[in-house]
Image: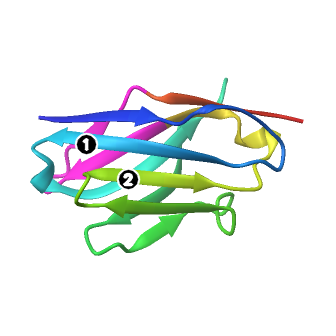
Amino acid sequence: QVRLVESGGGLVQAGGSLRLSCAASGVIFSLKVMGWYRQAPGKQRELVATIDNFSVTDYADSAKGRFTIARDNAKNTVYLQMNSLKPEDTAVYYCNAISSIARHYWGQGTQVTVSS
């Protein structure tokens, strides 16, 4: 089993920054890809960014140039640095991990609210 615990959400003004953290525990050696998704009220959950075991990253168009995903393997933690935040970035952000057998794990989510 894998447990993911997010932290770092909160309320920030437009143009501000936040850094989200996701600490993984359990059978973490099996994790191949980790990433962040978000879900705004009334909308479907969407991909924000991913990073694999080779530190290859991928971003949604909405995140490119503003968000940076990184992982610290020694700490079993993945980060999402979010800069130049916009009100439309307001959502619950979820940490995601995919194992070698394509099983998905999810954190409990952390709220990010960007005021205009």
When asked about the image quadrant of residue 62, the answer is bottom right
Circle 2: element type = strand
> Which residue lies most toward the right here?
116
- For residue 78, which numbered disc appears in the image? 2
Write the start and end of the magenta stretch as one range: 94-108
Residue highlighted by disc 1: 24
Q: Is residue 97 magenta?
A: yes
Name the side, left or right, on which 77 lies relative to 115: left
Q: Amino acid at mark 1?
A: Ala
Residue 1 location in percent, x, y? 11, 35
Residue 23 location in percent, x, y? 31, 42
Q: Residues within 10 Å of mark 1 (few under 14, many from 20)?
A: many
When asked about the image quadrant of residue 90, the answer is top right
Quadrant of image for the C terminus: top right
Q: Is residue 88 magenta?
A: no
Circle 1: element type = strand
